[in-house]
Amino acid sequence: MRFALETLGCKVNQYESSAFFESLTRAGWQPVPFSNTADLYIVHSCAVTNKASYQTRQLVRRAFRTNPEAKLVVVGCDAQIHWHRYVQERLATHIVGTQEKFQLLLWLQMPGSLDAPCVAVHDARSYGPLQPLAVTTMLGDRSRAFLKIQDGCDAFCTYCLVPFSRGRSRSLEPAEVLRQLERLIGAGYGEVVLTGIHLGQWGMDLGLGGLSELLNAVDKVRHPARIRLTSLESKEITEDLLRALTAYSWICPHFHVPLQSGDREILGAMGRPYDPEQYADTVQTLRKLFPRAALGADVIVGFPGETDAHFSRTVRLLESLPVTYLHVFPYSPRPGTQAAGMKGRAVGHVLKARARVVRDLGRRKKRIFQDRFVGAVLEVLVEAALQSDLWKGTSENYLTVNFSAKPPVPLGSLVRVRVHRSTDAGLFGIALD
């Protein structure tokens, strides 16, 4: 029996898809590309934007065209939120929510058809403690591993469905984090990314001291890999966390701190718990402590009520900050959120123009940051062989580095590279090791 798996959305989804892949292959299923004929198609869905929901439905329809007799399974956030739509539009044979998906093999044993699908979706806010997943290899990545240490969110930003799709914030017990980390490092990964839906809330539900306490525990475990953190909210970058970040050289100097808007009024309408000045102080502190660090930000443009003046304040703030790359999201109303009922969102050419302005700014900032490292030595995680003696990887501070090396270097290894030039395709250099 053949299966095909396609994953949309965040790094947490990618990690969870690796667990699905392992459980299916252990059960005797044979993986094939999603474009091939299969007996089972699984779409691991995302619901964070209208585009992600649309892409999920398109993938399921594509699978049906490839093999109308196959099981068509949609799992995850869009299945959780919009299960009724999949039923009404007869899109899937099995519709499995964000917690139920971890018993995927069980649900596949249940009968399901387009006319009468198997629906396994319950209230996400009632989900119990976070359970570990038996992941030993990453789907499609032989160099970098993800480790989900937290799930869910209690922030309830007015534009976001995640608290409803992922449930309340839950943390993986520290002993289990260390066990999984040792297993992934033992499998040969040169970098492990600690990830979660609201990473900075790790440990709060367990009565622990937060992410800094976990990093202190990780330091007591011997490991050759470097550790990267995913997104951290600005107010969660506390003095305790900063002490831990500066204490350990194995933590990558790369910090992604969502902004969303640089205007105080719009931040309030979004339900974000900080103001532009506090955010700026956090980013400036990070730059002072980590001069070589990549500093990223998320930005939403066109939020309801955002005027030209509001948008200009966002652009001015971003121009003044030492951020090095930007993830830009045109506002997408999500039914069921508070913001969906708000008036005055930007649409059409106005929305596109605002997104283009911020994306252009992000590209300029990224190139300025990248150019700083010509002549420097960077530690590069080897991710792909481009030619017989040309390799590609990512530096500790999140830059794409192409480099020549003789003899060949194994994927997943960490190599010191002297950078010689900077181009639109990234940095180029020569391995020193």
Image (tube, helix red, strand yellow):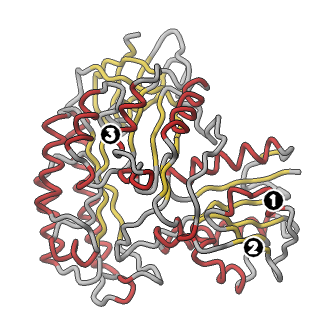
> Seen in the image, is 173 located left or right of residue 298?
right
Q: Residues within 10 Å of mark 2 (few under 14, many from 20)?
A: many
Q: Compare residues 401 and 97 and report the one nearer the observer.
A: 97
Numbered disc total: 3
Tell me the quarter of the picture where residue 271 sits.
bottom left
Disc 1 and disc 2: Cα gap in Å? 17 Å
Badge 3 or badge 2: first in the primary sequence: 2
User: Can you give x and y, in whole percent of width and height, for residue 98 in the image?
Assistant: 61, 64
Q: Which residue is mark 1?
A: 106
Counting from the top left corner in percent of width and height, residue 314 is at: 17, 66
Please say whether residue 224 is visible from this viewpoint: no
Check the image and report above or below for 287 versus 164: above
Can the viewer see residue 259? yes
Q: Secondary structure at mark 3?
A: helix
Front residue of 230/59: it is 230
Ranked by sequence position, the earlier of labels 1 and 3 is 1
What's the amino acid at mark 3? Ser
Between tags 3 and 2, which lies in front?
Answer: 3
- The extreme front residue here reads 207
Q: Can you identify the residue that label 3 sits on?
A: 212
The structure residue drawn at horizontal position 16% and vertical position 40%, both measured from the top left corner, is: 287
Q: State the SS at label 2.
A: loop
Q: Amino acid at mark 1?
A: Leu
